[in-house]
Each structure stands twice: as C-alpha cells, then as structure tokens.
Image (tube, helix red, strand yellow):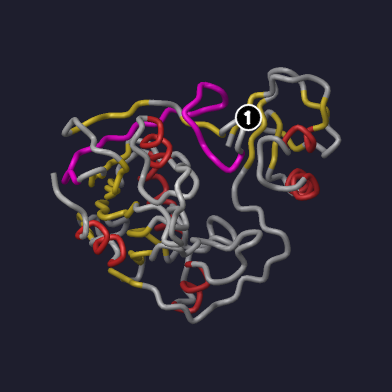
Amino acid sequence: MEIEVKENLIRIDKFLVDYMEESRSTIAKMIDNSFILVNGNKVKANYVVKMGDIITVEEGFVEDIDIVPEDIEIDIVYEDDDIIVVNKKSGMVVHPGNGNMHGTLVNALLHHTSTLSDVNGEIRPGIVHRIDKDTSGLMIVAKNNKVHNILADSLSRHEIKREYIALLKGEFLSDTATIDAPIGRDKINRKRMAVTNVNSKNAVTHLRVIERYKNYTLVRLSLETGRTHQIRVHMDYIGYPVYNDPVYTNDKCSDFGQFLHSTSIDFIHPTTGEEMHFEVDVPEYFKNFVDSLEKK
C-alpha cells in the first residue's frame, strides 16, 4: 500500500492510525522493523510527515508468532517437485497474522511438506499470491525459491490467468462488462477498499454473465490487475455486490461469507514450460444455494 501525505506536521505513527487497521503501538513496531518506509527510507516513529511524502506499507508484519505445522485437511489439486495447486476452502485464512495464528493454509502446508519457498519470509512460506479468507478456490504454492521468483514475475506480467465465479445481488442486464476504476483504501472505513482517486491504483475487471435468476446473477470474472478486494469493490461500485459479502453489503450474512470462487487458473509451468490448466467447481454450499434459485 502506498499513501501520499496531504497533511503537515503530524507524527507518522499517529497519521497512519487513520489509514490502517493496526494499533499505534503495532504501527510503531512496523516502522522500527522497516515494514513502513517514507520515500523509500527507514524513519523513526516520531518522524513528522510532510506534504508530498510517499509512505509505503509492506504486508506480512507479524508480532512474535511461532508458526507451527498443523494437521489440517487441504484439497490438493496438483503437486510435483516444484509447485502445489490448492483448492482453498472458504473461511480459511491464507497465512498467519495478528489475530490469526493458527488454522491457516500455511499451517496446513507446513504439515504437508517440509519443502516450501521462503522468499516472502517465515510467515508466508510458499505463498506466491493470496485470496481472501472467505473466497474459495485455486492458488499456486511454490516449493522452492527459484520457482517462486519465476511465478511472481509471471504474476507481475499478468501471464497467470485466473477466473472467478461470483453470485451477484440483482439482475445484471448486459451480457458482458468491463469495470475500469481505481481502487484505494476507504477513507471512512479502513477495513474496506473503495473506488477512489486518492492513494489508489488502477484496477480492471471483466465480467461475463453465466445465468440470470430472480434477484441474482451468476457471473464469471477475470482480472487484469490484482488489487485487494478488487472483485468485491468493483461489483459493489456498479451496484451489484457479491451476495453474502459481510464487508460490502449491509445485509445479514451467513458465516460462509461472500459467494466468490477462484474457479480456474492457467499458467506456464516454471520448470517444464508446460501449459497448465486447472478448474474446480464452486463449494457445495455455494452450488446448493444457486440451485435453489428461480431462473429468469
């Protein structure tokens, strides 16, 4: 996350409380451990921000967490000496963090194998890319650093193609659509992202209707960019939020969370050069609800 300072004469740890979910003391520790930089440089927590400063906040800071292998069942779609393709269940956090020390995909992966990349540090072994806790579906895991770096480079060049299936609230009229709208942190609710021109990055989502139902639309989505909560933000922005989303709707939601599923992934194998394609169906809870809907 990048934040452009538009205020003067305020301590950086106090300034960032309004932009981050963490406490002021945690922010100070992040600054001390170089997870927060100003104009690319390390500063102290009492640094006074100035107009035009660019604050960079790196992800992955964890306070004193001992990450242990845990015998948790995971759905492995494919595995070889270099990669694992996992079908993550809804409700599972990808890696440990403050407040989520156990029960994550990383804990399960550490129990499954002792061979995982460490490019992203101790708390994210093997994790090349993430999906939200309550988003289900396909993820690639790297088993060594060479493969991790190749996959990360492919991601940055948009060479790894991922498609999602989502159930939207409302009956979307067009058969296809492209949403091109920048995403940044919501100024009012820091747990949300929003379409905004302030401290934002470009975001492009392509949508195709699969089926229309009374009061709902089932869609397939592909991303040109990979912003935090991108699909959820863009769908809310156009007035058709993802069904059962506890963050981007005001509805009473079940514990299952948003009906959003990473259904397919295409990439070139980083070692063999083979074209890889994997596709998995939506979770049973998702499928059963859709099957209960009245078609248009």
Give residue 92's position: percent from left, percent from top.
Answer: 47, 64
Report the residue marked by disc 1: 3
Residue in the picture at 32% in, 29% down: 179
Report the front residue among 141 and 210: 210
The structure residue drawn at horizontal position 35% and vertical position 26%, both measured from the top left corner, is: 180
The type of residue carrying mark 1 is Ile
Q: Residue at x 48, y 43 (%)?
A: 250
Residue 240 position within the rendered picture, expressed as x and y whole percent measured from the top left? 33, 37
Which residue is situated farthest in the right direction here? 46
Q: Residue at x 80, y 48 (%)?
A: 25
Q: Secondary structure at mark 1?
A: strand
Q: Is residue 200 a member of the stretch shown in magenta?
A: yes
| Quadrant of image for the C terminus | top left
Identity of the residue furthest to the bottom in this view: 71
Residue 111: % across, % down: 49, 79
Residue nearer the viewer, 21 or 269? 21
Residue bounds of the magenta highlight: 190-213
Is residue 7 depicted above or below 170 in this figure?
above
Where is residue 230, by image quadrant? top left
